[in-house]
Amino acid sequence: MLFNNDPFRDFDTVFRRLATTDASHPMPMDAYRRGEDVWVHVDLPGVAADSLDISVERDVLTISAERNWVSEEGDRSYLNERTSGRFRRQVHLGEGLDPEHIDADLTDGVLTLRIPVAERAKPRKISISTGSHAAIEAESSPA
């Protein structure tokens, strides 16, 4: 039997839920650029793919997920530390990314997004031509 002999555990749980702010997300995230793509990894253990919602509106990426545990009649809870319910995380993509071509994959509780860098944001070489300016002829009218 699993026991937690802590008379204040319920207070800790309530305090932890109240103290959750933007600095402590239930959906930890890593993001980095590799080559021509930005990669985002979000930890979502216990979240089913059909409970995920990923959307982009006005260059804001929103990830919503839900994880629930429903107790059955007669269950006696000894520990309740895993956060459940609905979670949401938003990230501003900026103009340099292509939100139309985002790929998403959920494997082993990790959501991976591949966001391509937009063509307009990629560095490009500008060619220089020499001596190809056409002369502009001007007519002068007699006064």
Image (cartoon, helix red, strand yellow):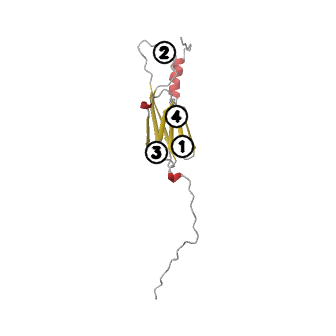
- Disc tally is 4
Q: Is the residue 123 above or below the residue 26 in the image?
A: below
Residue 59 visible: no
Residue toward you, 16 or 73: 73
Give the distance between the C-alpha atoms of the residues marked 2 and 3, in whole angstroms.
44 Å
Tag 2–tag 1 contact (CB < 8 Å): no
Q: Which residue is mark 4?
A: 42
Give the image location of residue 140, x and y in percent: 48, 84
Q: Residue at x 48, y 36 (%)?
A: 105
The residue type indicated by label 1 comes to: Val
Number of residues whose C-alpha sits closer than 10 Å to that of mark 2, classed few (under 14), some (14–19) or many (20 or more): few
Pointers 4 and 3 in contact (CB under 8 A)? no
Residue 129: quadrant of the picture:
bottom right
Q: Find disc 3 in the rendering and name its residue.
A: 101
Query: How far apart are the two marked residues, 1 and 4, measured between alpha carbons?
Result: 13 Å
Nearer the observer: mark 2 or 3; the answer is 3
Work out whether mark 4 precedes mark 3 in sequence or the reverse, and give the earlier one. 4
Secondary structure category for the residue under label 3: helix
Query: As shown in the figure, which amino acid type bears the numbered disc 3?
Result: His
Alpha carbon separation for disc pair 1 and 3: 12 Å
| Residue at the disc numbered 2 | 77
Looking at the image, is mark 2 or mark 1 nearer the viewer? 1
Q: Is residue 62 above or below residue 44?
A: below
Residue at 51% from the left image edge and 28% from the top image edge: 45
Mark closest to the chain's N terminus, 2 or 1: 1
In the picture of the structure, the residue carrying the numbered disc 1 is 38
Q: Secondary structure at mark 1?
A: strand
For disc 3, the neighbor class at 10 Å (few under 14, some 14 to 19, many from 20) is few
Quarter where residue 53 is shown: top left
Residue type of the residue flagged with mark 2: Ser
